[in-house]
Image (tube, rainbow, N blue to C red):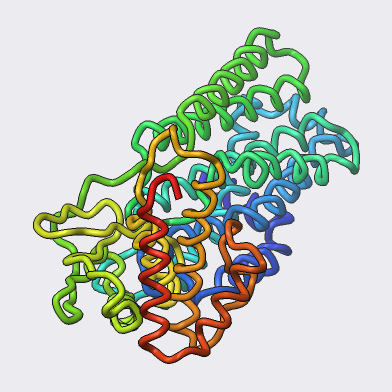
Amino acid sequence: MIRVLGMELRRSPFLWVVLPISALAIAVLLRERETWHAVWPEASVQVIAAATQLPGVAVAAVAAWAAQRVHRTGTADLLNGAARPRWQIEAVQLFSSLVFSWIVLAVVSLIAGFVTARMAPPGSLWPSYLLLGFAATIIVTALGHAVGSTVNSRLAPPVAGFLSFFPLFVMSLLVPYFGEANKEVSPAALAARVAFAITCVFAALFVSARTVVGRRPAWRPLMATGSAGLAVLAVVALGPPQQARAPAEDPVCGLVERTRVCLWPENAARLPGALQATKALIDTTRHVFPYPDVVAEEGLAIAGGSTVFVGVVAGSTGEAFGSLQSFRLTWALLKDCGAEESEVAGRRRIEARAKLDTWISSSHLGRLQDAYWDSIALTSAGRQEVGSTLKLARAEQVQWARRQITIMGACGG
């Protein structure tokens, strides 16, 4: 069997395209490496995205191309007269296609591991994410094999690539978009995807065997197709592949004056940028409002003192961390006046928050921020007011900011 597999590997069309597909995967991986190269879970997601999305479409197409050999003249008679069962022959060819798809995943994993190890805290790529990628490669390869062995047309490879596009991109069923530190792979969703991958393999083998030979009982391909359909429903029903992690009790923290800044352990490399952004915000808002005792990323187990939780964003920078802080801080200052408040009064208070938020961000930049980053609640007149305020002396800017806070807390206008 090993000798037969070696023959399949040597004559597979993947032998000619595995290098270009690997190069494509590496290019996708390294295109924005500065966004993930310091966080292991983010690097893990980028690995499987790079190896299974665009390359996955190519893998499905080439797998279909490889499987189409059964439609060549004389091949069907040769297969019918083979000593081995038809499904075993199909299994060897499918496995040879899978080997090449796993080579792409392995190459990308090694490169990402090397890059991340230089910047991130001690750790490794998360096995659960890699298993998701492993399952995804099996699914798209089996899909391509099934299409190629059942469709006697030159259109089979592009059709297989087109069909793989939907679970990989449109529905995002197989690979998550981001790998934030406060998320992990859902065990139930992972089990469903692994089961889906196994079902796809059996479906591809039975359907292709039935199509070529024509002497298998009809219930086998029907059973395989039905099982694949049930597996798809299970994957969809279980939702996205990620779930929230349990609260971390060992965050990495730093101190800025009296404010403690805490991040998830996996985000430790981003702590210096977070501290710098927090220091700039404290300086900007000094004498405007008291700063909280703790600024922490969402999902951390933090006890003691006033705390503001900041969302965890994949690829976050110090500047982004500061913007999220400003957003949460200004919303915390906005008083909840209930359903009795008039629309006009509520809009006025919300615009005051938007002006305060824009002023904080612009003060940090030393200029009025680009309008693209403004809140949708900020009117053109409000933006002009912020721009005029930035030209005033520091004491006058503080007074203006305090007036916005007063408006934000005044129910009824």
Q: Nearer the viewer, residue 132 or 366?
A: 366
Residue in the picture at 87% in, 39% down: 72
Residue in the picture at 90% in, 43% down: 154
Identify the image quadrant of residue 73: top right
Residue 93 visible in the shown view = yes
Residue 146, how many percent across, how many down? 71, 33
Q: Nearer the viewer, residue 80 or 124?
A: 124
* Number of marks drawn: 0
Residue 110 visible in the shown view = no
The vertical placement of 120 against 21, above or below, is below
Residue 358, how many percent across, how many down? 50, 71
- Left or right: residue 293 versus residue 184 is left
Q: Nearer the viewer, residue 167 or 21?
A: 167
Instruction: Spot the residue most to the left.
Output: 304
Q: Nearer the viewer, residue 292 or 226?
A: 292
Residue 263, how many percent across, how many down? 26, 65
The vertical placement of 190 against 214, above or below, is below
Instruction: Spot the residue most to the front.
Output: 413
Residue in the picture at 71% in, 27% down: 208
- Left or right: residue 340 versus residue 126 is right
Identify the image quadrant of residue 204: top right
- Left or right: residue 250 versus residue 11 is left
Identify the image quadrant of residue 139: top right
Residue 386, how many percent across, how many down? 54, 76
Residue in the picture at 55% in, 41% down: 343
